């Protein structure tokens, strides 16, 4: 156990559980913010929301190998532990849990969580078929290890958030899962650790993703037509240089295709700009009001 400014850093499960148990024994509540590091203002908003909802905030930093496909950027994913700890300190964080891979997946580890429901709706799962099993397994492990009262996740990864809601409910995990709205740069680009991959020209184009989604959502509400407006949005992004994996309107809770523009939903997109894969989503607020 080492001290970094205000927040304590632990890399072992015993140290994590001892600190959380001491807080709980004092009647203090605990919020958990799971991350893969390379922290930005979006992560800091999760930590700030944790401070609003609990007495103590634990932030985890673990680049989880099981949620990366073989052709993805696991080895090059940004890692910046010292800078991350300094940012967490600045918002009054209490504990950083930064385990080694062997602490999470020891020799002989053989159990994973099988996911369905919102994990198999033809969005991220079409392109990253093993991703959500890896996400569900690591999140379940972190929730069991840290035993928080509340855990916070960003809405930028909206399908992931739905998978975690489903998993925590199905397994009766004693924790409240909270989704925190997307944090954006001034020009609308959703903050992401992978934005560092964008070159200057790509960074100038990237805000069109959010702008196009916003226009599409407004057009769906105005016209009552879903697919024609989705097609127009796909065409606009393609002409701007994006390579689209998907751009779909889905029901907010189930992520099944949205067929009635009077119902609330989300437009979700994944698109590549150069070597960077960007994801985002915006709400469609129907006559029934937004569901999330």
Image (cartoon, rainbow, N blue to C red):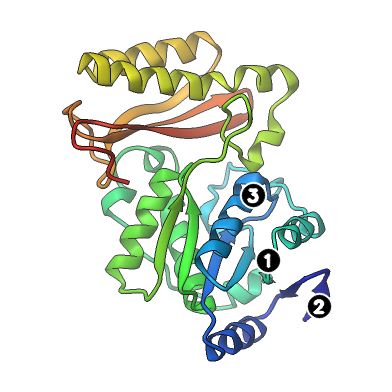
Q: Nearer the viewer, residue 168 or 122?
A: 168
Specify whether residue 24 is in view.
yes
Local SS, label 3: loop
Q: Which residue is drawn at 57% across and 27% down?
A: 188
* Picture coordinates of residue 259, whole percent (x, y): 17, 29
Return the residue at label 1.
Answer: 93
Nearest to viewer (mark 3 / mark 2): 2
Say if 190 sits above or below 170 in the image.
above
Say if 109 sits above or below 197 in the image.
below
Q: How crowded is mark 1: few (under 14 residues within 10 Å), some or many (20 or more)?
A: many
Say if 6 sits above or below 47 in the image.
below
Q: Does residue 214 appear left or right of residue 278 in this picture?
A: left
Nearest to viewer (mark 1 / mark 2): 1
Q: Residue at x 67, y 55 (%)?
A: 37
Badge number at residue 74: 3
Badge number at residue 2: 2
For the N terminus, give its image quadrant: bottom right
Local SS, label 2: strand
């Amino acid at each position: 156990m080492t001290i970094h400014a205000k927040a304590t850093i632990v890399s072992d499960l015993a140290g994590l559980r001892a600190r959380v148990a001491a807080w709980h024994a004092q009647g203090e509540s605990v919020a958990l913010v799971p991350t893969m590091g390379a922290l930005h203002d979006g992560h800091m908003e999760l930590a700030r929301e944790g401070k609003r909802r609990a007495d103590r905030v634990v932030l985890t930093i673990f680049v989880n190998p099981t949620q990366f496909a073989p052709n993805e950027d696991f080895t090059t994913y940004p890692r910046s532990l010292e800078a991350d700890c300094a940012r967490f300190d600045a918002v009054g964080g209490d504990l950083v849990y930064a385990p080694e891979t062997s602490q999470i997946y020891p020799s002989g580890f053989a159990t994973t969580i099988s996911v369905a429901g919102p994990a198999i709706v033809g969005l991220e799962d079409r392109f990253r078929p093993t991703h959500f099993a890896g996400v569900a397994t690591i999140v379940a492990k972190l929730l069991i290890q840290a035993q928080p009262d509340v855990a916070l996740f960003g809405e930028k990864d909206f399908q992931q958030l739905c998978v975690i809601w489903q998993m925590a409910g199905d397994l009766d995990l004693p924790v409240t899962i909270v989704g925190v709205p997307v944090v954006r740069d001034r020009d609308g680009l959703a903050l992401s650790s992978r934005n560092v991959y964008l070159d200057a020209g790509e960074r100038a184009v990237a805000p069109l993703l959010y702008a196009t989604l916003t226009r599409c959502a407004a057009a769906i509400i105005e016209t009552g037509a879903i697919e024609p407006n989705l097609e127009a949005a796909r065409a606009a992004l393609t002409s701007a240089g994006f390579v689209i994996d998907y751009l779909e309107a889905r029901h907010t809770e189930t992520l099944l295709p949205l067929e009635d523009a009077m119902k609330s939903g989300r437009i979700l997109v994944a698109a590549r700009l150069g070597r960077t894969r960007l994801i985002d989503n915006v709400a469609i607020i129907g006559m029934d009001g937004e569901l999330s």
